[in-house]
Image (cartoon, rainbow, N blue to C red):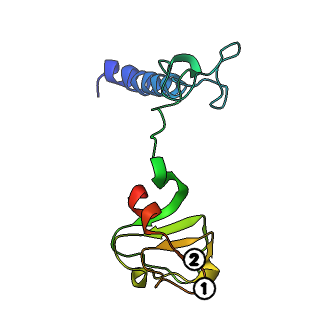
Amino acid sequence: MNRFGNVSKPLMWFMALLLAASLAACGSDNNNGAPAPGVTPTAPGAGTGVGGLGAGPAPVNLGAAGAFVILAESAITDVPTSAITGDVGLSPATGAGIGLTCVEVTGVIYDVNNTGPAPCTVQDPTRLTAAI
């Protein structure tokens, strides 16, 4: 290796390390995700996202379906010992397609013909049709 190579090779590694270290700090806001001081966050879907403003897309209005944590049309399967907090619904399939137990659901199980798990199933085809 010539004399120039002996001098420039360590310098090249040092410059690469220095560049990597300086780029590692890019994008850091030092606020742990909080808006910048003096900046008031906007409602979801509003703002530009600059300086902590804006929090992503606006929420989707789920209408009557928003009352259910699980809502299906054909079947609801289960992993044994599930813990479901909220209402569950199945329509237009019959309640026989609900593979949950009353103990697993903290809420109400709705079906179209009252053939879901007894005694916690409520027959309410009108509510389910609106939600679906």
Q: Could you tell me how far apart the alpha carbons at marks 2 and 1 are, in whole angstroms?
A: 18 Å
Name the one closer to the observer, 89 or 4: 89
Q: Quadrant of the C terminus?
A: bottom left
Label of residue 82 in the image: 2
**Label 1 SS:** loop
At which x and y percent is residue 23? Answer: 48, 24
Q: Residue at left 29%, top 23%?
A: 2
Give, as a three-letter code, the residue at label 2: Ser
Which residue reaches farthest left? 1
Q: Residue at left 39%, top 81%?
A: 97
Q: Residue at left 37%, top 20%?
A: 8
Q: Residue at left 66%, top 31%?
A: 32
At which x and y percent is residue 46? Answer: 50, 22
- Graded by Cα atoms within 10 Å as few (under 14), some (14 to 19) or many (20 or more), the crowding at tag 2 reads few
Label of residue 6 in the image: none
- Nearer the observer: mark 2 or 1; the answer is 1
Q: Quadrant of the N terminus?
A: top left
Which residue reaches farthest front? 126
Label tally: 2
Name the residue beneath numbered marker 1: 119
Between discs 2 and 1, the one toward the N terminus: 2
